[in-house]
Image (tube, coloured by chain):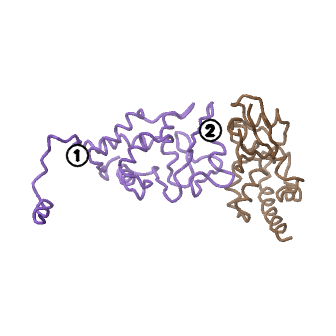
Amino acid sequence: MITVTVNGQRHDIDADPNMPLLWAIRDILGLTGTKYGCGAAQCGACTVHLNGESIRSCCTKLSRAAGQQIVTIEGLSANNNHPLQLAWNEMNVPQCGYCQSGQLMSAAVLLRENPNPTDQDIDDAMSGNICRCGTYQRIRAAIHRAAELAKEGAKS
Amino acid sequence: MVTSIIALSFKTEPAKKKNNTATVVKDSIGSVRAFMSVYKVLMSPRCMNCHPAGDQPLQGDDNHIHTMNVKRGVDGHGVYSMRCSNCHQAENDPGVHLPPGNPKWGLPPANMRMVFQGRTPRQLAIQLLDPKQNGGRTKAQLIDHMTNDGLVGWAWHPGEGRTLPPMTRAAFAAKVRLWIAKGAYVPSAKAK
């Protein structure tokens, strides 16, 4: 039995410790917002937070998450109101949407560590998340917008 | 007393070999020869790819720049949502082209870049011996690092599809010890 805290809720998972964390999140816990893309840590679709770091859950064993804090897209905010989610909506970022939960999870780490990122900072942070629809320009614009929203939120 | 110390300090005849010592006699040719073997290992992709000239790691036997725009970062472990351990686990993921792993996976930090790529044998030997460029290591610590460090050792267990350095780790460690024991001589500028 492996105990994992996901989105603040403790789960005891009866599974092979070598199971990819993504499998446990999707198939056992039913949190399907996190996507399977490549299975090789090449695309970023499966990005979740492990103790605040944006790991690729397809290549991370369940055993690494034992006793740790996992946050998935479902737990990024209480009411889908993280500045990134608001900006994503405002700017209609997704096209097909498949990569977007991974994009948001990576962008959230960027903004946490750098509340006012430059284009270069965004490129450095986001190059591990690919988008087959090519929404990169909107992703970049929405991260800048989210940074503004976060500042406005801090003032109000 | 002072006179004798000064006299000893300026003794001009060659030092005679003592019979009761176990130290290896300094030997510039043997030392450099040993280093050239060390150099071949350090310049192999498994070592050099994480000791790049730039601030991005390398991949593959052709030393191409790591895909995904990966950056060194201040601590050598990446930036923002592109930290090494976000993809690289504590052990190799099984399968060709899957992320290799080690608990210490990363580059040298930005303030001690320890570049191998592009270094001549002479440049690399000087760098390895200089505590200001080698992470503050003494010669003994350098030997220990090469011989026992877990991340260095990964080079000999790199996972499926990756070539090995040109000699075993034991042979490599022996060459490092020999290089140092014979005087830690630095190759000439012509050495390749």
Query: SS of the residue at dot 2?
Result: loop
Q: Point out residue B74 in the picture as x, y percentages from the top left corner.
A: 58, 58
- Mark 1 nearby-residue class (10 Å; few <14, some 14–19, many ≥20): some
Residues at discs 2 and 1 in contact (Cβ within 8 Å): no
In the rendered image, which residue does mark 1 sit on?
Answer: B26
Quick one: label 2 or label 1, which is nearer the N terminus?
1
Residue at screen point 14% across, 62% down: B5
In this rendering, position of residue B147 left or right of residue B150: left
Give percent across and percent down for residue B100. Answer: 59, 38
Question: Which percent across, then down, holds residue B113?
Answer: 49, 55
Say which chain tag 2 marks.
B
| In the foreground, B106 or B49 | B106
| Foreground disc of the pair 2, 1 | 1
Dot 2, how many residues are within 10 Å of its Cα: few (below 14), some (14-19), or many (20+)? some
Could you tell me the amino acid type at mark 1?
Answer: Lys
Dividing the image into 4 quarters, which one contains the N terminus of chain B?
bottom left
Q: Identify the residue shown where x is 41% and y is 33%.
A: B167
Q: Are marks 2 and 1 on the same chain?
A: yes
**Residue at left 24%, top 44%?**
B29
Q: Is residue A131 above or below residue A29?
A: below
Left/right of residue A126 with respect to residue B140 in the rendered view: right
Q: Which residue is mark 2?
A: B99
Label 1 is found on which chain of the structure? B
Inter-mark Cα distance, 2 to 1: 43 Å
Chain ID for purple? B
Residue A92 point in image, percent of width and height:
88, 55
Q: Label the brown chain with its letter.
A: A
Q: Nearer the viewer, residue B91 or A11?
A: A11
Name the residue type under label 2.
Answer: Pro
